[in-house]
Image (spheres, rainbow, N blue to C red):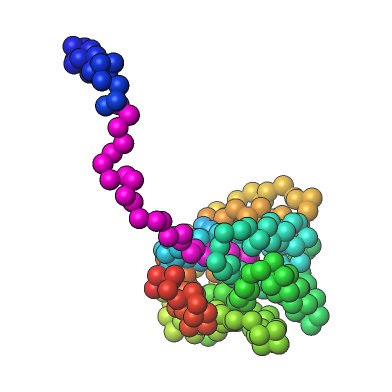
Amino acid sequence: MRLGLMIAAGMMLAFPALAQTAPSGVGERPPVTPIKASKVILVGDSTTQTLSGWGGSFCAKHVTSFLHCVNMARGGRSTYSYRAEGSWDLALSEMKAPGFETVWVLIQFGHNDQPGKPGRSTDLASEFPENLRLYVREARAAGAVPVLLTPLTRRQFVGGRLENDLEPWSAAIRAVAKEMDVPLIDLNAKSVAAVQAMGPSLANRFAQMPPSREVAAAALTGTTIASSTGVAPVAAPAAQANAAVEPLGDPKLAFDYTHLGAEGADFFSAMVTAELAVQVPKMRRMLVQ
């Protein structure tokens, strides 16, 4: 081994031109054609963010290498708190980054705009739709193409019927999309139809963790019960000074009727992808269905 290295070193010293000779054909390369890549940015709450929503699966499995996917959704956020904490400013910075042919921003809110969310709830009649209009106007001003999504359904049933308490917020989003000529993915309507068709027992498979025996048994009757039934209680975290940062965007890794595990994320990300291919035709060639 040492003798071989000494011989190689000696040859390099004796014939220095050999070390500097360019590989054959390098100077004959054809001109490189610059790529035309685009970007999609996800904005929303825990039902969109990675690990508890559909967004992680969407970015990982449903876009080609020519569509850069950035998931900026954060758990616990509403149309108000996402902006108030500065997350929307970060998203605007992503929209303005140079070099991309087209930048789309998918915007999905509703869950945390509902009443009973301290520091986050918004007024459905006025504040919520106006917040959406402002997101649309600012996204367009940043050079991006906004796409509105109605909120993913929860998976609670009574007597075999899915309870869709997010319909009023979905209706408001549809109205803003029509008013401002924004592409709309009606994820609420699509997810409601799919979850209603499969029923509570099958829908429970979409959660992050398996249900307790009590919860699973109740689902067989067609009526869901509290998701924590039969589960040992966990000490509540210390109170946050700012309700807008709860739960800090981290998945709870528990069974509930809102958040998604891997199976749920795959199912609904495929649904979003299929709808995007129809409602935003320019994205179709960059989507993996």
Res 111 → quadrant: bottom right
Residue 43 is inside the magenta segment: yes
Q: Residue 53, position in %: x, y?
A: 53, 64
Residue 284: x and y in percent read: 45, 76
165 part of magenta stretch = no
Quadrant location of the C terminus in the rendered image:
bottom left
Total of numbered circles in the picture?
A: 0
Nearest the eye: 289 or 124: 289
At 57% from the left edge and 59% from the top edge, which residue is drawn? Answer: 99
Q: Nearer the viewer, residue 176 or 120?
A: 176
Q: Which residues are magenta?
A: 19-46
Position in image of residue 190 (x %, y %): 51, 82
Place of residue 60 in the rendered image (x, y in percent of width and height, measured from the top left): 44, 60
Residue 15 appears in the picture as rendered:
yes
The residue positioned 59% from the left and 81% from the top of the image is 184
From the viewer's perspective, is residue 48 above or below residue 136? above
> From what the image shows, is residue 74 above or below residue 286?
above
Q: Residue at 25% of width from left, 16% of height from top?
A: 14
Look at the picture and state if 88 lies above or below 24. below
- Residue 92's quadrant in the figure? bottom right
**Viewer can see residue 171:** no
> Quadrant location of the N terminus?
top left
x 43%, y 67%: residue:
62
